[in-house]
Amino acid sequence: MKGVRIALVVVASLLLQMNLRGQDKGSVAIRLDSLLAGLPAEDPVLTGGIMEGIFSLGEEGTALLCSRIVPAGTGDDLKERYAVASLTATLSADRDDSRKRAWERQIIRYMRLSSDREVTAFFMRQLNLIGSDDAVTALADYVVTPGLCEDAVMVLQSVDSPASAELLSSTLSSDTCPCAAQMMVALAERGYESAIGSYIDWSIRGSSSERAAALYALASTGSPAARQPLLRAAEEASFRRDPAGAVNALLLYARNAGLAGNRKEMKKITGMVIASAGGAEAASQRIAAMSVITEVMGDRALKMLVKAAGDPDPEVRGAALNLASSLPGGTVTKKLIRVYPKYDREAQLDVLFALGERGDDLALPLMMKAINDPAPEVAAEALAALARLRGSEAVGTLLEWIMKNDGEAGHRAAATALTTLLDSTGTDRVAASLPESRGQATVTLIRLLAWSGRDKYFDAVYDFTGSSDMAVRATAVSSLAALSSCNDRQKIIELLDRTQERGEAAAIRHALVTATQQCDNPEKGSEVIIAALDKDPNRKELIPLLAETGGRSALKRVAWEFENGDAATRDLCFDALLHWRDHTAAEVLLDICASGNKTFGRPAFDAYLKTVSESPLDAERKLYMIKDIAPHAGAPDAKAALIYLAASLGTDQTRLFIETYLSDPSDEVRSAAEDALGTLKPDDH
């Protein structure tokens, strides 16, 4: 179907070309209107066909199209503007230059004819794609016109011919130049040298942005004539950062000179910048200078970078190491290793990080030595660097280090590094190391297994819940939740039976809930907890767990405990019902309301409404539940709450239900019913 549409457009276009001769202006307008009606088209191919049709209308047709572009607010020319822009884009890719030039002439004509600035700018922007030296000539007046100068410069940039550069240059030296900064940037991007005199002039008398553009343009030329003006500007800024970017411009000049082969000039300028860049506030200037030196000199800059890597300023130190790391080959690694002992502690940490990132195995001996450094921070950084350097091959070394050392900071670093490397095989190696571990090593290995979250390691960790080492036992207990499965519930219950410490009991209960929630069937999930209650009725602390595991049997047991327990047990059971994992607790709350219990009756009513409100049930089912509790809404405020909940459902049956309360004896209830009905849409009845 799409191919048929394209064919029709092409055929129509050919027919149009064959029949245009002799047509009057009215016929051209009709044809143009017909083509414009197809815009915007469904795809680029159809758009291209329409553009060919418009261009086939000849100069008369394209002139008519351009004449319809009007100032904003004076008419609807949206399709015409779309067509002009699309035709420009289509012809810009045309191999036939004569077609581009024909359209360019039309664009220039209407650009000149327009007296509206925005319309002029619209036509001018078309020249960005199809402009030639004819456009350059046409723009001579506009480059000195405020409000249009910027658009004109953009066209001159896109034309990129000697004529466009000469126009920009001559305008810079004239008395009127409303967008000098943009012109200088445009010329700078071409490395245009013939305007150096103007650049120097603007670098002295211009505004902050104009001075910045002038200095940038001077630096971009790479001409020796630019040196003194740039140096003067940097000296005036005391070789510090300034709005005009004088030092950056001077360094750009040095870079260009160095890349052109004048390394002596580059060294002299960067040396001045570095020597003048004292204090933390000038760190960025030093870094910029080092970047230039490194780009030009390559590995010959290594001596400077290695020295800077020991700088007391962390910003400079980090930049030097980054620049050094950008250089290829083992020489960099060897040099950093050789000077490593001479650095202070902070610099050593940065070097270890850099070597880890570099990934050169030449650094491995240093890493192996540094992981045993007596300074905990050095050992920690070395462990992390080793992991980055060796990847999965570092797992064995890191585990061996954990087994031999006790430092908590180092263990934390080793464990963190291992979490980035461990796969199933690596985690099995952690589990295999666990039986032979002691103290802090055991704690770290257990944490790593818990991090894996794989229930296959539950038994390995469970064995340590009876450890005489308090830290090991606490870690093992707190890790059970992450490793437990439905099959582990009985072991967790047994552990809970043996535990006297309150904190550990809480962690074990959490593990029991987590394990139970792994069961496919909620009834099966809660059965172990219920069995524990059957075995020891005094284990009331298990009741809240049933709220999290859920299921019919759990709900039935909590309801029984509520009816038959003492006051404390009833409080515990009611709290469980309030926090039940789903809406099924509503039926027990309804029974409590129906029982006439004076203590829990109203709280159960309120909890029932909350459960209904938050449940995922549909509106019809919720209304049934509201009707079930309605007979037990005795107090006026209880009825009002019921009415407002019903109104939130917004169904037809809701309106009928609420209307029954319009005759209630209570003013409060009648008022609530009227308010609730007012919130329902008229079409709800």
Image: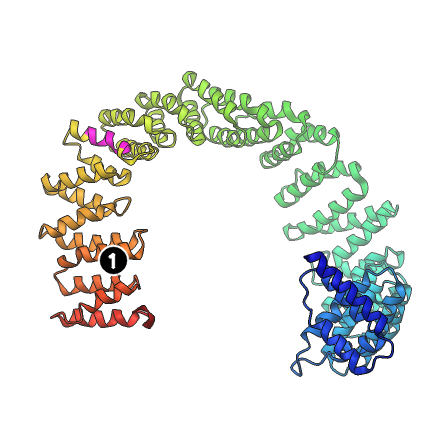
Specify whether residue 530 is painted magenta.
Answer: yes
Q: Secondary structure at mark 1?
A: helix
Front position in the image: 347 or 187: 187
* Residue ID for mark 1: 623
Quarter occupied by residue 210: bottom right
Q: What residue type is disc 1 on? A: Leu
**341 sits left or right of 494 in the view:** right
| Residue 410 drawn at (x, y percent) | 49, 29
Specify whether residue 301 is painted magenta.
Answer: no
Against 239, residue 41 (above or below) is below
Front position in the image: 151 or 3: 3
Question: In this view of the protein, can residue 39 be seen by the observer?
Answer: yes
| Residue 293 drawn at (x, y percent) | 78, 44
Q: Which residues are magenta?
A: 524-532
**436 sits left or right of 160 in the view:** left
Quarter occupied by residue 105: bottom right
SS majority, magenta: helix
The residue positioned 74% from the left and 63% from the top of the image is 8
| Residue 472 drawn at (x, y percent) | 36, 25
Front position in the image: 661 or 420: 661
